[in-house]
Image: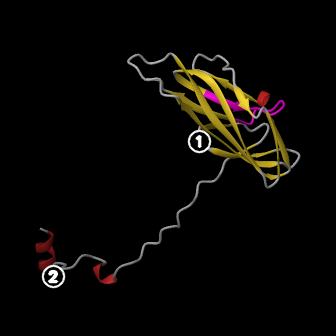
Amino acid sequence: LLVGALAGCGGSAPTATPGADLGSFPIAYPPPQLAATPIARPGKLLLLVMGDAARAQFSDGTVALVKASGPDFAYQGGGTPAASSRGTMQLTLQVESGQLTLRASDLTALNDAGQLVPLDVRPATVTVSAGSKATLTISGVFISGDSNLTWAPPGHVVITWDFSTELD
């Protein structure tokens, strides 16, 4: 119908796609971006998944990159899943400026029932200066379900890492 209308007006039907004679255009894509490391500070709690890192900033100018990983559970084997199992995590501190002391008492864990999980932290205390790094090994007995590890240096909750415990 449109062709007939154009023909009746003395014109001819278009034979090419509009814009086809314009050539091709390169499409500019932005370069890949690395995800920004979240910043935690007293008064600004971060909730992360286990394995994520955060930059912790304190009022005295201390800045550290902190990462929790794990937990790793020993395979129990057998036909019936265990009700609980010892899990081992690592907490790595890399101090960028200042000095940071981390004590076992700065760490707490809650299991899926909301109960505190007693933790064994090795070393029990570590002090890390700018340009240095330390890794703590943390273990506790966890039940199946969601759990978390919280780092709260004296009086300030800074970071909570969430993780799932699957024992089946």
Q: Residue at x 24, y 76 (%)?
A: 17
Way the structure is coloured:
secondary structure
Residue type at mark 1?
Answer: Gly
Decide if residue 126 is on the left or right side of residue 53.
right
Q: For this rendering, which residue is in front, 32 or 144?
A: 144
Q: Which residues are magenta?
A: 148-159
Q: CA distance from mark 1 to mark 2?
A: 66 Å
Q: Residues within 10 Å of mark 2 (few under 14, many from 20)?
A: few
Q: Nearer the viewer, mark 1 or mark 2?
A: 1
- Quadrant of the image occupied by residue 125: top right
- Quadrant of the image occupied by residue 21: bottom left
- Quarter of the image with the C terminus in it: top left
Q: Residue at x 63, y 53 (%)?
A: 36
Q: For this rendering, which residue is in front, 108 or 157?
A: 108
- Residue 163 belongs to magenta span: no
Closer to the chain start, of discs 1 and 2, is 2
User: Number of labelled discs?
Assistant: 2
Residue identifier under label 2 = 12
Residue type at mark 2?
Answer: Ser
